[in-house]
């Protein structure tokens, strides 16, 4: 039989104690360094902070600088951006603030072909028929990320300029009144931008008969396509 | 199997202690890294030495859970319990080393002490394992590493008791191979006698060594108070059409606006944390649904959580039962996520099976879509980050980094009544 000598037992105890003490010291130092390093990083702003997207309105490809410039002017000139009582824009305003030719003005709206629709009216009338109401509501409730809804009302060349100006104004208002009724949105005035162009500015060509309209089955020509209001949400940050 | 002089049990205990020390170190230092309020990878592997990874959901869930730290209201992030494991395993490394070197010469009391005390990490591990399974529903690999180490340590301590057996010398003469068991035998009486107070001293040492890392940590942890209110305020506290979901809670005392996605795992974890910590029922919650799904959310170019728009509509359709539906979505989130990935018809079938055909009719209603759209515009009007959850306590935005390990500290500072 052998017995561990007293010396080796003491050595074992001392070794165990020393190992524990060393580990405690080493861990304490490592902890202090680790926490101090975190503190240092806390005080030092990240050079390349991970970028987080911020929630915002939609912005799609057709929002070119030119398009946005015209729309910005609409917003400011037609009372939307300033929060004034809605007043809309009449032909003279549009001609002035747009500083753009008729064709270029219409061209700006080309990308909205599928997003919007052309609401057609009877000759000399501003009342919305049932199909007009339906397509208008469909377009209104497909808002997605857009902030502004534009209504560009027109009249055909038949009749006097003053009468057509008034008629297109009434058509724009018809749209606005119906939307107010169905949307039940207390802030609708800040969303809907009205432009009425009469027969003075940016008349539509027959090509626009191919756009989605409220009367797809009826005969469409350059006269009838201008007895209309083009409506669309605009997916641009303005 | 183990003779009185066998060092194998002590070696096993030493190995287990070192292994436990490694896993506890990973856990502790990963935790400490987060004191800088940034996102970091964490270690989450059974295999020591593997690098930290971003794919460590289970270990993150454990880290963010209320069970991972003590004194969370006093210190940002609290004092991680892995610090105590770190200290305890340090003690066990030293003690098992002592037993290993001393071999049969170790006092009987030391062997018994080690066997008894060596079980305590296992008991704590079993408790934590139970919490992981029942409360968190996940097992973090690093934690499992600690549980296994604790088991091996307890095993080493227990087996070491076998070395205390009296050698049966007389009946067993040298065997045919020439091995004489009497050669290795150390009669109990030959082990040194030590004072009965020594185990008390060892126990005290264990306590001290266990607590030292926590004291060091607590004395150096930075002050996070200046950062708590630096994440802005809500611009527009109420939606003008009153379409947000008001969740009724039992003891509402603090208004809060939560932007959540029912299929977002972080939202689920956050919601469960609020409920577990008895905070949710003290909030007057205004819920804004913010599904990270491009089917309805124009702020994304691809769906992060396919189907989240439909499930959000289900929550909107819930009316008085909105919370019930939200919590159903969270509890069945994995299933719903799979259904969402399988396609809209599958998801709708799952929703219909649970909530009936009226729910589907409501989901398809145009006004539900309009309502969800208003939630998204509310988020847009408030320029919130496109990530969920987003939390506003009153008007104050709670920083993302304060919604997990710093949650109780932050609430203690900004709305202490919620913790009472």
Image (spheres, coloured by chain):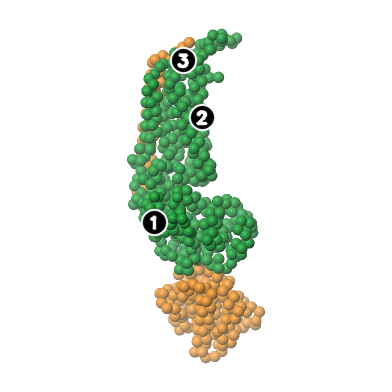
**Nearer the observer, disc 2 or disc 1?**
2
Task: Same chain for labels 3 and 2? Say yes or no.
Answer: yes
Residue B231 badge? 1
Q: Residue furthest right?
A: A217
Judge whether B415 appears above or below B95 on screen. Answer: below
Q: Quadrant of residue A87?
A: bottom left
Label 1: few (<14), some (14–19) or many (≥20) C-alpha neighbours in 10 Å: few
Q: Which label's residue is closer to the chain start, 2 or 1?
A: 2
Q: Nearer the viewer, residue B362 or A171?
A: B362
Q: Chain of mark 2?
A: B
Which chain is green in the rendering? Answer: B
Judge whether A102 appears above or below B2 on screen. Answer: below
Q: Position of B305 compared to B84: left or right? A: right
Q: Position of residue B399 (x, y in %)?
A: 41, 54
Spatial CA span between label 3 and label 2 = 26 Å
* Residue that mark 2 sits on: B152
Question: Residue drawn 45% across and 66% down?
Answer: B239
Q: Colour of chain A?
A: orange
Spatial CA span between label 2 and label 1 = 47 Å
Residue B188 badge? 3
Do tag 3 and tag 1 residues touch (Cβ < 8 Å)? no
Q: Chain of mark 3?
A: B
């Amino acid at each position: 039989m052998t017995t561990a000598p007293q010396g080796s037992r003491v050595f074992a105890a001392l070794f165990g104690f020393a190992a524990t003490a060393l580990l405690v010291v080493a861990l304490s130092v490592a902890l202090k360094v680790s926490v101090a390093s975190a503190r240092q990083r806390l005080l030092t702003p990240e050079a390349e902070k991970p970028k987080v997207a911020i929630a915002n309105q939609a912005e799609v490809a057709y929002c070119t600088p030119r398009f946005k410039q015209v729309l910005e002017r609409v917003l400011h000139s037609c009372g939307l951006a300033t929060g004034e009582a809605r007043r809309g824009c009449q032909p003279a305003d549009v001609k002035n603030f747009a500083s753009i030719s008729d064709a270029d003005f219409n061209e700006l709206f080309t990308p909205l072909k599928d997003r919007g629709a052309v609401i057609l009216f009877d000759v000399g009338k501003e009342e919305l028929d049932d199909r007009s109401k339906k397509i208008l509501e469909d377009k209104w409730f497909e808002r997605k990320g857009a902030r502004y809804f534009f209504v560009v009302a027109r009249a055909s060349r038949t009749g006097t300029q003053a009468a057509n100006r008034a008629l297109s104004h009434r058509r724009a208002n018809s749209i606005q009144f119906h939307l107010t009724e169905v949307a039940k949105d207390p802030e609708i005035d800040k969303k809907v931008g009205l432009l009425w162009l009469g027969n003075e500015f940016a008349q539509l060509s027959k090509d626009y008969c191919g756009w989605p309209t409220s009367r797809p089955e009826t005969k469409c020509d350059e006269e009838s396509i201008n007895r209309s209001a083009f409506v669309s949400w605009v997916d641009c940050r303005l | 199997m183990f003779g009185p002089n066998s060092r194998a049990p002590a070696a096993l205990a030493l190995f287990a202690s070192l292994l436990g020390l490694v896993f506890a170190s990973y856990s502790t230092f990963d935790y400490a890294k987060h004191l800088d309020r940034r996102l970091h990878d964490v270690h989450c592997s059974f295999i020591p030495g593997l690098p930290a990874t971003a794919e460590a959901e289970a270990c993150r869930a454990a880290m963010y859970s209320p069970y991972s730290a003590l004194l969370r209201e006093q210190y940002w992030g609290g004092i991680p319990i892995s610090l105590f494991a770190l200290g305890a395993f340090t003690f066990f490394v030293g003690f098992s080393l002592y037993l290993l070197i001393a071999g049969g010469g170790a006092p009987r009391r030391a062997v018994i002490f080690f066997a008894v005390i060596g079980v305590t990490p296992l008991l704590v591990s079993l408790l934590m394992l139970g919490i992981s399974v029942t409360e968190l529903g996940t097992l973090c690999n690093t934690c499992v590493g600690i549980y296994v180490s604790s088991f091996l340590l307890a095993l080493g301590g227990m087996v070491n008791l076998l070395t205390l057996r009296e050698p049966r010398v007389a009946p067993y003469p040298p065997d045919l191979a020439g091995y004489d068991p009497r050669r290795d035998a150390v009669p109990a009486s030959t082990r040194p006698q030590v004072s009965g107070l020594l185990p008390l001293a060892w126990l005290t040492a264990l306590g001290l060594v266990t607590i030292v890392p926590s004291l060091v940590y607590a004395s150096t942890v930075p002050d996070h108070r200046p950062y708590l209110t630096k994440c802005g305020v809500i611009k527009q506290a109420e939606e003008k059409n009153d379409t947000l979901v008001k969740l009724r809670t039992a003891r509402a005392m603090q208004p809060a606006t939560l932007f959540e996605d029912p299929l977002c795992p972080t939202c689920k974890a956050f919601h469960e944390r609020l409920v577990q910590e008895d905070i949710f029922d003290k909030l007057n919650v205004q819920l804004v649904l913010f599904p990270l799904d491009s089917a309805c959310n124009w702020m994304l170019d691809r769906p992060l959580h396919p189907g989240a728009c439909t499930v959000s509509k289900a929550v909107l359709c819930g009316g008085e039962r909105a919370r019930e539906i939200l919590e159903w979505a969270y509890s069945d989130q994995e299933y719903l996520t799979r259904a969402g990935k399988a396609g809209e018809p599958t998801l709708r079938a799952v929703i219909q099976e649970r909530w009936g055909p009226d729910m589907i009719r409501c989901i398809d209603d145009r006004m539900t879509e309009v309502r969800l759209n208003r939630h998204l515009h509310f988020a847009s009007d408030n320029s919130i980050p496109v990530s969920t959850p987003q939390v506003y306590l009153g008007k104050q935005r709670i920083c993302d980094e304060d919604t997990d390990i710093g949650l109780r500290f932050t609430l203690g500072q900004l709305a202490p009544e919620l913790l009472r």
